[in-house]
Image (cartoon, rainbow, N blue to C red):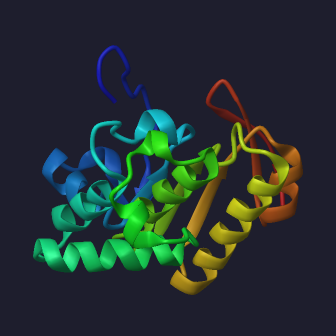
Amino acid sequence: ISDPGRIISGSIYFNGVDLLSISQSDMWKIRGREISMIFQDPFTSLNPVITIGEQISETIRQHFNVSRKEAFSRAIALLEKVEIGEPHIRYGQYPHQLSGGMRQRVMIAIAISCEARLLIADEPTTALDVSTQASIMGLLERLRAEQGMAIIFISHNMRLVKKYCKKIAIMKSGKIVGRIY
């Protein structure tokens, strides 16, 4: 956590390793590759001056030793996997040229590009209409099953939480104040 944030106490275990005790270089090996994240607002998370395809390809090249051509092929396959039509056209488009739901699908494509075992989804349906929310949640559920990954779903939308989550922890001020199993 960068300044002024700090960790006062506790631990974060993933795969038997306390993530708070490892080096930054070891943490970089885990980020994206083992643990991935979908941020709340795809419009501010995506770089506005780089095409969405290049942003997906960049993530792939960062974590795998592949050529630009191979990264392109994988990016196209990911766009298809997250149900974006005309992936060859969309690859060359910029975030502002896509709808909110399509931008969120791009964020999901980036998040699953390294086949992480844990996906943290922070309010992935915020500002989306009800039908797009259902579509995004259905996509996440399908990808979870296909890839065998776990999802931590962070949301204020209790309707979605109730429908899609097996275990629920209710938090206030960073502390768990209730659990529903």
Outermost residue toward the bottom in this view: 146
| Horizontal side of residue 34 vs 167, given as left or right | left
Q: Position of residue 59 (x, y in %)?
A: 26, 60
Image quarter hosting the N terminus: top left
Task: Find residue 2 and report its horizontal and vertical position in percent.
Answer: 29, 25
Horizontal side, residue 171 vs residue 84: left or right? right
Q: Is residue 15 visible?
A: no
How many numbered discs sit on the rendered protein? 0
Choose between 58 and 178: the one closer to the eye.
58
Locate residue 107 relative to residue 69 in the image: left or right.
right
* Picture quadrant of residue 70: bottom left
Q: Quadrant of the C terminus?
A: bottom right
Which residue appears at 89% of the width and 50% of the height? 159
Across and down, in percent, residue 14 comes to 42, 62
109 vs 118, nearest the viewer: 109
Q: Residue at x 86, y 62 (%)?
A: 163
User: As rendered, which of 52 and 23 lies closer to the eye?
Assistant: 52
**Image x and y of residue 91, in percent:** 36, 62
- Between 146 and 152, the one nearer to me in the picture: 146
Residue pictured at 17% horizontal, 61% vertical: 62
- Residue 172 picture quarter: top right
User: Which residue is at a point 79% across and 45% down the rendered structure image?
Assistant: 129
